[in-house]
Image (cartoon, rainbow, N blue to C red):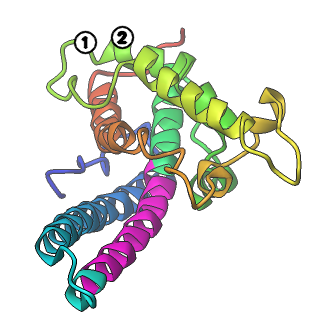
Amino acid sequence: MSPRFPDLRDLGLLSSAESGALRCLNRAHLELRGEWECARALTRRLLAKADLEEGYTGQVPTPHHQLAARAASSAAAVYERTIGEITWRYASAATVLGITVWDRLICGRPPLSTQTLELLAAEEPTLGQLRGIFSGPYARLLEFRADEPWRSAGKEQEDLLGLLETASFNVTHTQTDGRYPDESEAADFRLTTASPHDVDAFWEDLLPPVLHLAEAVPFAIAQRLRSGSSTRR
């Protein structure tokens, strides 16, 4: 198995469907992370070049090289936003699925059904789903991870909840169909569709810690399974 995904095949309490779903989402968000990081680097390089060209151009009447640099950096920024949205969709789904599987193990519940796995993996989670996962289940995971080698992955619960509340604030202060959604309505929103294209994406600050967490949770699952039979809490 990849060093960035543990071997979950012979760990008994995890179903093959759960293991397969976790592995597929892991590969998706790891590959997308690389593309997103490359897109970020390209955007910053082209923006710096455009700034440099602008400094050289001064008052030249037809600064075509400056216009070309600006056009290239704008196109790169659009691509970065697009690949970032896709990366967020899979990283957030992987995080919700992984913590859900981990929590059902720690609480002694039966394996997730194929239908439930597909619902969790098939699309970006809502704000309400993220808030639920980053509350009780993530707190239990933090308790368990205290002395493990992957303990530094992700952010602490209060930081993630704080970032999520900022995103929720942005959603409730953005008009949808001519009105502002209240908090209960915002819970059903997904950040990629709620973010207007002319402002910073509402998921932007959440993506780095969620990527770390999405990669860490399968190792938490493996460690929990190796520690013995599940214990109800």
The rendered magenta stretch, by its main secondary structure, is classed as: helix
Residue at 21% x, 84% y is 60
Residue at 48% x, 28% y is 163
Q: Percent from the top left, x then y, of residue 112?
A: 60, 43
Q: Quadrant of the C terminus?
A: top right
Q: Is residue 88 shown above or below 53?
A: above
**54 relative to 71 in the view: left or right:** left
Q: Is residue 81 shown above or below 60?
A: above
Q: Are marks 1 and 2 in contact (CB under 8 Å)?
A: yes
Quarter assignment of residue 24: bottom left
Query: Tag 2: Cα neighbours inside 10 Å, few (<14), some, or many (≥20)?
Result: few
Under circle 2, the secondary element is helix
Residue 143: numbered disc: 2
The residue stretch that appears in magenta: 68-91
Q: In which quarter of the image is the N terminus?
A: bottom left
Viewer-proximal residue among 119 and 230: 119
Residue at 41% x, 39% y is 205
Residue at 66% x, 57% y is 193
Q: Percent from the top left, x then y, of residue 149?
A: 14, 25
Viewer-proximal residue among 64 and 2: 64
**155 relative to 25 in the view: left or right:** left
